[in-house]
Image (spheres, rainbow, N blue to C red):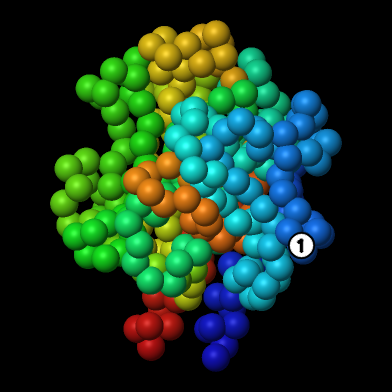
Amino acid sequence: MRHATLTTSVLALSVMSATSLFADTINVNLNAFANGSSVTDVNAQTAGGGQWWNPSNGSVSATFQSGLGRTGGTALVIGNRGSNNGVVNNCATSRLTDAAGESTVAPNKYFEASYWFRTASSTYVDNFNLKSEGWGVDRTSWIRFESNSANNGIMASAWGIGNQGDGVNDTGGYFTANGGFDQTGNNLLKLDFGSWYRVGLTVTFVDGANGVTNDIVTHSISNAAGALLGSLTATSWEQGARGYDQYNNGQIFGIDKLGFDSRMWGAYTGEHAYVDGISYSSFAVPAPGAAALIGLAGLVATRRRRN
């Protein structure tokens, strides 16, 4: 019991130490939104202004509905309006005051985000699709969840672009059952319809445009009990943005919000997923001593297991 208490205390200190250095954090209170209200098409999202955005001519529907959250509260319900309009027609959360990005465009170097999601359907359906992205003026990478008829479950994939967006040097892949990833789609991780999962995103921005200096993106998936199911690290879409696709006219950009979408796949219109517990932050430097504290917690846990 003493070891467990010490481990918990050390981890708590680690979290407090890390959190104290967040330059800007938004923990979304979905219960503050009126039941049945929709995310609308706003004229402008100002930094720190609290405006959400969903284009009226896009494929994605986004509403707030009570009773559908993970603990019975309000959920953000992402669905499809019956079209496949546009690649980046997403529901976007409100903007942070301080973006994360390379030093020439943003005050902070790191971006972190997490949220819970589950499928709207409790049983398998074809063409389920939920995608989330770190967003600024455009996306930096994405994680996608979609139906997998081979095992009547959900498969997950996350991708970045390593070289000019040409499809040759893409980075990322599919989450696998052994906690790794594979670009060919073998041994896929199976997620269950109707179950809640926690998704994590970390982006580390590195000044420079080429090769290994490309910004690094990590996505993780955990189950409702908190067990890590998989983690995938890839480079961001920075080089594609600067070169091949010319996002933002080829200029680099930071990120300050999350985007969610469910574009048309097959004949699946209507509600696709419930999203809850949305949190995202930008910060300048890793918390001093946090890594050491986490390491100490691991040693304590190891000693406890041996005893």
Horizontal side, residue 48 vs residue 27: left or right: right
Judged from the image, the secondary structure of the residue bearing numbered disc 1 is loop
**Frontmost residue, 101 versus 134:** 134
Q: From what the image shows, is residue 223 above or below residue 138?
A: below
**Frontmost residue, 216 versus 160:** 160
Point 71% across, 45% down: residue: 39
Horizontal side, residue 166 vs residue 287: left or right: left
According to the image, label 1 marks what residue?
35
The quadrant of the image that shows the C terminus is bottom left
**Frontmost residue, 80 versus 254:** 80
State whether residue 201 appears in this view: no
Point 69% across, 63% down: residue: 65
The quadrant of the image that shows the N terminus is bottom right
Q: How many numbered callouts? A: 1
Dividing the picture into quarters, in which one does residue 218 lie? top left
Residue 98: x, y in percent? Answer: 74, 32
Dividing the picture into quarters, in which one does residue 154 lie? bottom left
Q: From what the image shows, is residue 297 above or below residue 155?
A: below
State whether residue 66 appears in this view: yes
Residue 8: x, y in percent? Answer: 59, 75
Point 63% across, 48% down: residue: 62
Residue 113: x, y in percent? Answer: 59, 48
Residue type indicated by callout 1: Asn
Dividing the picture into quarters, in which one does residue 212 lie? top left
Please, which residue is most extreme toward the bottom here?
Answer: 1
Residue 148: x, y in percent? Answer: 27, 57
Q: From what the image shows, is residue 89 above or below residue 93?
A: above
Q: Residues within 10 Å of mark 1 (few under 14, many from 20)?
A: some
**Frontmost residue, 148 versus 104:** 148
Point 80% across, 59% down: residue: 34
Q: From what the image shows, is residue 105 above or below residue 107?
A: above
